[in-house]
Image (tube, grey):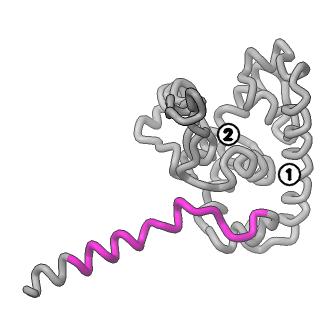
Amino acid sequence: MSSTLRAFLIVLLAASCGGGGSNTAPRDLDNACSILRERPHYARAFRATERRWGVPMHVQMATIYQESKFKSDARTPLRYRLGVIPMGRQSSAFGYAQALDATWDEYRQDTGRRGARRNDIRDATDFMGWYMTTTNERNGVAMTDTRNQYLAYHEGHTGFARGSYRSKSWLMRIAGEVDQRAEVYEAQLANCRAARR
């Protein structure tokens, strides 16, 4: 085997191994400090969004947990006809924040971040900050009100204003779970050095 071919194969192997960690979730999703220790770039992204938009880290983290379980390439499940024929995804939601195509495009246009990617944690948290700030401005939901921020995130600003979530007991239950997770994360982050770096 020539040295050029050997070098090419080594580079190819290294490249295929290097990016795998970003598509997998952190090991302990129930511990905010563990998540930040394992993925320091998450902490930087959460802090940047908190500074820019005022959305607390624990609110961001609980929402991302619910939406994607911290998987950068998360997608909605496939729909099937007759139980076997794939008919496409349930929606265009993608990435950490599970942002829909149209909402993501609106975010990029509104913020001027044309190169933002939904599978980049910094872009995803910035999107969430932008969206939750809009929720605050349009619907008066405090940045610290995880439950109602999540309901507006799920239902959209207009749907939330109409109260569309009230007829969805499953969504009300999930919003309560997101709120509880945010409280746990907040308590953990208070004693977490990784959150303050």
Distance of label 1 from label 2 (alpha carbons): 16 Å
Image side of residue 79 versus residue 191, left or right? left
If you read the primary sequence from the N terminus, does the residue marked by circle 1 or circle 2 appear first? 2
Q: Residue at 70% x, 26% y: name it.
A: 134
Image side of residue 79 versus residue 179, left or right? left
Specify the quadrant that holds the N terminus.
Answer: bottom left
- The residue that disc 2 covers is 129
Q: Percent from the top left, x then y, of residue 115?
A: 41, 40
Q: Residue at 66% x, 66% y: name it.
A: 26
Q: Percent from the top left, x then y, of residue 93?
A: 58, 35
Which amino acid does the dot numbered 2 rest on? Gly
- The answer to whether residue 60 is above or below residue 189 is above
Secondary structure, mark 1, is helix
Which amino acid does the dot numbered 1 rest on? Ala
- The answer to whether residue 124 is above or below residue 187 is above
**Label 2 Cα neighbours within 10 Å, binned few <14 / some 14-19 / many ≥20:** many
Residue 72 falls within the magenta-colored stretch:
no
**Label 1 Cα neighbours within 10 Å, binned few <14 / some 14-19 / many ≥20:** many
- The answer to whether residue 147 is above or below residue 33 is above
Q: Nearer the viewer, residue 194 or 2?
A: 2
Q: Residue at 67% x, 32% y: name it.
A: 131
Give the residues in magenta.
Answer: 9-29
Q: Nearer the viewer, residue 89 or 154?
A: 89
Q: Residue at 66% x, 62% y: name it.
A: 43
- The residue that disc 1 covers is 182
Number of labels in the image equals 2
Label for residue 110? none
Specify the quadrant that holds the C terminus.
Answer: bottom right
| Residue 45: quarter of image | bottom right
